[in-house]
Amino acid sequence: MASDNRRIVLAARPKGKPTDSDFRLETGPVPEPGPGQALLRTLFLSLDPYMRGRMSDAKSYAAPVAVDGVMEAEVVAQVAASRVDGLNEGDIVLSRSGWQDYALTDGKGARKVDTGELPLSTALGVLGMPGMTAYTGLLTIGKPKPGETIVVAAASGPVGATVGQIGKVKGCRVVGIAGSAEKCAFVKDELGFDAAVDHRSPTFAEELADAVPDGIDVYFENVGGKVFEAVLPLLNPFARIPVCGLVAQYNATEFPGAVPVPVLMRQALSKRLHIQGFLVFDFNAQEDDFRRDVGQWVREGKIRYREDVVDGLENAPRAFQGLLEGKNFGKLVIRVADRT
Amino acid sequence: MASDNRRIVLAARPKGKPTDSDFRLETGPVPEPGPGQALLRTLFLSLDPYMRGRMSDAKSYAAPVAVDGVMEAEVVAQVAASRVDGLNEGDIVLSRSGWQDYALTDGKGARKVDTGELPLSTALGVLGMPGMTAYTGLLTIGKPKPGETIVVAAASGPVGATVGQIGKVKGCRVVGIAGSAEKCAFVKDELGFDAAVDHRSPTFAEELADAVPDGIDVYFENVGGKVFEAVLPLLNPFARIPVCGLVAQYNATEFPGAVPVPVLMRQALSKRLHIQGFLVFDFNAQEDDFRRDVGQWVREGKIRYREDVVDGLENAPRAFQGLLEGKNFGKLVIRVADRT
């Protein structure tokens, strides 16, 4: 066991894009578990767009990370020492340990995971929070019907990829939006979407329109900004828009040239749009259904996934900055340590 | 019976606010019913904000009125002559006859109405389309729970007044927004809302905030524009926003200074807002429930209503222009002729 605990803390609240100086790597002693505590050793650290929100102190659904506090994250960890009933050394758990090598738990926030024949990292991706986000948001708010057209942005990411593939399971036409020709090819050829459109293309709006000859019935929103503006005129009457994320907006401080709200509301009225924001933990009651269905679809090969694994806790800040710009390709995880 | 049929046609598509020159009064012969037709004589003509949309050829859920075509409207009419089985001279019906003294029907679009002890005009108001709009939008999308706070704009109008009073029946705190001190007093003192705020006040946003100490759980949207911007920061997590109308926007051609869509979407996400446009005829299946419930509440005095009756078909264009500026006070109807 290493004798040091490395942790990455929020050094400053970013203005716009996070930079290296907004993070700081600190080293301290590995904590000792007291009675009723266990020591968790991080194996895989999940990096997700929502973390940008936690770096800001704007009012939100969750408290922000404190300046000088450890960055928040869900991790796959191994129990290194335990004084908690039911947790044994060597157990693999999910925990919100944050961006650090080691963390203590009282056991309540540590849940044993078993990914079967799949890599442990999938507990942070297709079989974890991103997969459940896709499943619950698409089915509960999007309510896709066979033959309808679903559009999803960030389509090569863990949420978008799962949304689209569940859409195919449900008998829909599925169009993905992604940020490079390579990602578009992956979405179409590997994930089986019906079409994919590159939002960096100068003719993006026209290409998107061409890809949805029957309009859009479900737009799964996880980027916002200009992509949404291209989607808006293509929405069909009674279209549903689960609002899951807005990664293209997270670094923005203002929105020059954006469509004004009254124009959106006019569309909402005349087309009877259903726009609804959600967070995955609003749907915790669906977790068993998610595990059963998505677990089966993955085993059957109906849902495929791609991971972008970066080695080393110290590389998390740079990897996270890249995530907000779409530089990752697949679910971004940091491999912090190997299972013993 | 008069020998002439007066009708008001769309002379030109308005740019911004409709003006007198956008309408034209024409006079022609009263049509003769052929086999399978009945002649309807208009008694009351309903004027409603949605008609502004029909004057425009912007893409919408309904076809626009043609230039030189008779302005559309629902009316209460009396059968003046009938060659339709089941329709008899003297019957009172609802029909989309438009802005004219007489119209022919094949009987399919004419439905007999009985308002009991209430004036016939209520078939165009609290017991008609506006009342059903309020009932279906509030209960189906707004889903108010006892103790929650509902805010409704245009609160002295037929939709807003009914929304608020149904809210009181459902055990909610109800705050109305209206356009004058007199309207606010009516909403509070006559309709029994808990509070009313004048949107023309220079301190409107602050007054609205003061009136909703526990935030807003349901905002029934029928005005849009600046009122919505004042509501937005006051919405609670999981707030529902049935979008019924946007009368404050109908004459606008652009929206300088309006909040951009990305700001709204950020709110939608972090607060998990549910924004949904609807049209009353999406909920036709609820018509029996509406008639039963609202009919009962009106009889019990739990729902009160106010009408703004203007005499004379020739005054419809001016009355309609005033409606779009909030000059009416209560449900605006034109009394075209008396029942015989």
Image (cartoon, coloured by chain):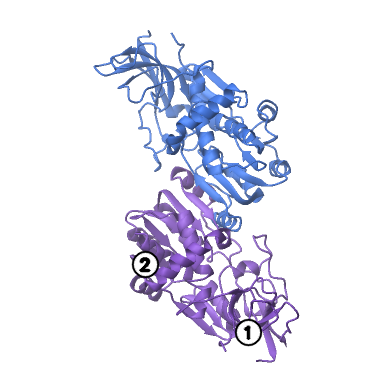
Chain colours: A purple, B blue
Kindly tell me whether residue B245 is visible in this rendering. Answer: no
Position of A318 relative to B230 (above/below): below
A129 sits left or right of B189 in the view: left
Please report, as a chain letter, where disc 2 is located.
Answer: A
Residue type highlighted by circle 1: Glu
Tell me where residue A243 appears, x and y as whole percent.
52, 58
Quarter of image, res A51: bottom right
The residue to which callout 2 is attached is A196
Task: Give the chain letter at badge 1.
Answer: A
Q: Is residue A338 above or below residue A248?
A: below
Q: Which residue is mark 1?
A: A89
Residue, far left: B35
**Residue lying at 40% horizontally and 17% vertically, measured from the top left:** B101
| Closer to the camera in the image, B331 or A338 | A338
What amino acid type should be assigned to the residue bearing mark 2? Ala
Describe residue A194's horizontal placement relative to residue B270 as left or right: left
Residue A109 vertical position relative to residue B300 in the rendered view, above or below: below
The N terminus of chain B lies in which quarter of the figure? Answer: top left
Q: Residues within 10 Å of mark 1 (few under 14, many from 20)?
A: some
